[in-house]
Image (cartoon, rainbow, N blue to C red):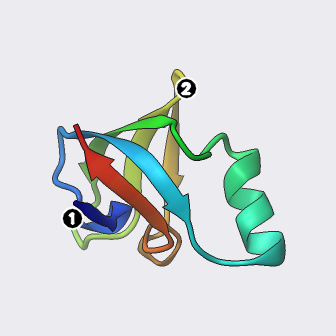
């Protein structure tokens, strides 16, 4: 079942299935290492829900919820 990265619970590991969005936005997401098939661990979410902190490819990254909405993932 696919869902947006912003909807994944803290402590879950998911696999990227699709990146929505176009142009420079999609390129920026891919430059951060978020590509189809990569695994993402959701570390924590800020108290007001934005940003989401993830671990991908061995480093920590914070994403705005608006950006996390365009990353479709599947739970293991």
Pick the front one: 16 or 58: 16
Q: Residue at x 42, y 63 (%)?
A: 72
Q: Is residue 61 above or below residue 68?
A: above
Q: Residue at x 17, y 38 (%)?
A: 11
Residue 14 at x, y = what percent? 31, 42
Q: Secondary structure at mark 1?
A: loop
For the residues bearing labels 2 and 1, Cβ distance under 8 angstroms? no
Q: Residue at x 52, y 43 (%)?
A: 61
Mark 1 surroundings within 10 Å by alpha-carbon count, few (fewer than 14), some (14 through 19), many (20 or more): few
Mark 2 surroundings within 10 Å by alpha-carbon count, few (fewer than 14), some (14 through 19), many (20 or more): few
Residue 59 at x, y = what percent? 54, 27
Residue 28, quarter of picture: bottom right
Residue matched to label 1 = 47
Residue matched to label 2 = 57
Q: Secondary structure at mark 2?
A: loop
Tell me: 60 left or right of 76.
Answer: right
Tell me: 74 left or right of 11.
Answer: right
Tell me: 67 left or right of 23.
Answer: left
Residue 25 at x, y = what percent? 74, 72
In space, the residues marked 2 and 1 are separated at their CA atoms by 25 Å
Q: In which quadrant is the C terminus drawn?
A: top left
Residue 12 at x, y = what percent? 20, 40
Query: Which residue occupies the extreme top position in the image?
Result: 58
């Amino acid at each position: 079942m696919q869902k947006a990265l912003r909807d994944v619970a803290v402590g879950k590991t998911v696999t990227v299935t699709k990146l929505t969005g176009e142009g420079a936005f999609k390129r920026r997401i891919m430059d951060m290492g978020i590509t189809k098939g990569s695994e993402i661990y959701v570390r924590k979410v800020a108290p007001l829900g934005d940003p989401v902190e993830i671990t991908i490819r061995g480093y920590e990254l914070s994403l705005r919820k608006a950006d996390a909405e365009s990353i479709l993932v599947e739970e293991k």
